[in-house]
Image: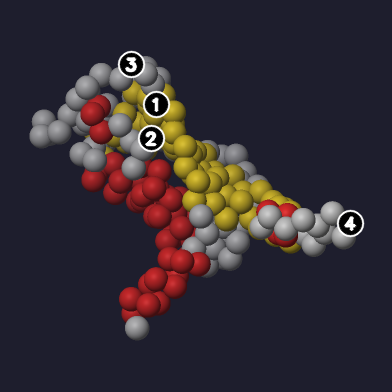
Amino acid sequence: MASAATFLVAACAPSITVGVNTAPDLQTAAYRTFTWELPDQFPTGDPRLDNNPFFVRELQNAVTVELAVRGLREAQGETDLTVHFHATVRDRVDVYETDRVAGYDMSGYATSAQIVHYDEGMVLVDIAERTTKRVIWRGWMQTDLSGAIGNSAVLGERVRRGMKELFEEFPEHVIAKGMQ
């Protein structure tokens, strides 16, 4: 029963889109530690998420876990890297011509359109060299946050899943493993 419920939740979870940009001249095994910069003071576009300490903590924890899995550890003081994020939420309306997409010929008939309204959330994570502030990696994750912003459990799961997918694209060859 529990595995069926887990499957059902996973099957109904909204899709997550990720993308990355990596500096082309990264040195192999160059980094071991990171620290966090202060979060943006800019509004996210949704007052429920602005200055939301739960969201900030969940996002930072998820990124910290993903970097630790890859061999980077969080430290204080003189670190190799800094991590910074930006988050936005905006209303989205998508209209799908369901019959046309399914391949039906609807010429001569009024078309049936499906309208979907949702909260689109986007998180951009920058990882930069601490001393030069040169961004070496930028990743972004985009997903439907409808029903998640007011629900800590759902929001936390969405953030963790998004960061996991995002950091699958992180260039592990730049991490100095075993030199801590």
Residue 134 image-quadrant placement: top left
**For mark 2, does the 10 Å Cα neighbourhood hold few (<14), some (14 to 19), or many (20 or more) residues?**
many
User: Which quarter of the rendered picture does the N terminus lie within?
Assistant: bottom left
- Answer with mark 4 or mark 3, whichever residue precedes in sequence: 3
Measured in 3D between alpha carbons, the distance from the residue under mark 4 to the one under mark 1, in whole angstroms, is 50 Å
Q: Position of residue 135 (x, y in %)?
A: 41, 24
Q: Residue at x 40, y 43 (%)?
A: 166
Q: Position of residue 113 (x, y in %)?
A: 77, 59
Residue corresponding to mark 1:
22
Measured in 3D between alpha carbons, the distance from the residue under mark 4 to the one under mark 3, in whole angstroms, is 57 Å
Q: Amino acid at mark 1?
A: Thr
Q: Amino acid at mark 2?
A: Val
Labels 4 and 1 touching (C-beta < 8 A)? no
Residue corresponding to mark 4:
108
User: Which quarter of the rendered picture does the C terminus lie within?
Assistant: top left
Measured in 3D between alpha carbons, the distance from the residue under mark 2 to the one under mark 3, in whole angstroms, is 19 Å
Q: Amino acid at mark 4?
A: Gly
Q: Residue at x 38, y 35 (%)?
A: 83
Q: Which mark is residue 25?
A: 3
- In the displayed structure, 3 sits above or below 114; it is below
Q: Of discs 2 and 4, which sits in the foreground?
A: 4
Labels 4 and 3 touching (C-beta < 8 A)? no
- In the displayed structure, 138 sits above or below 106; it is above
Q: Which mark is residue 83?
A: 2
- Answer with mark 2 or mark 4, whichever residue precedes in sequence: 2
Callout 3: helix, strand or loop? loop
Q: Of discs 4 and 3, which sits in the foreground?
A: 4
- Answer with mark 2 or mark 3, whichever residue precedes in sequence: 3
Labels 2 and 1 touching (C-beta < 8 A)? no
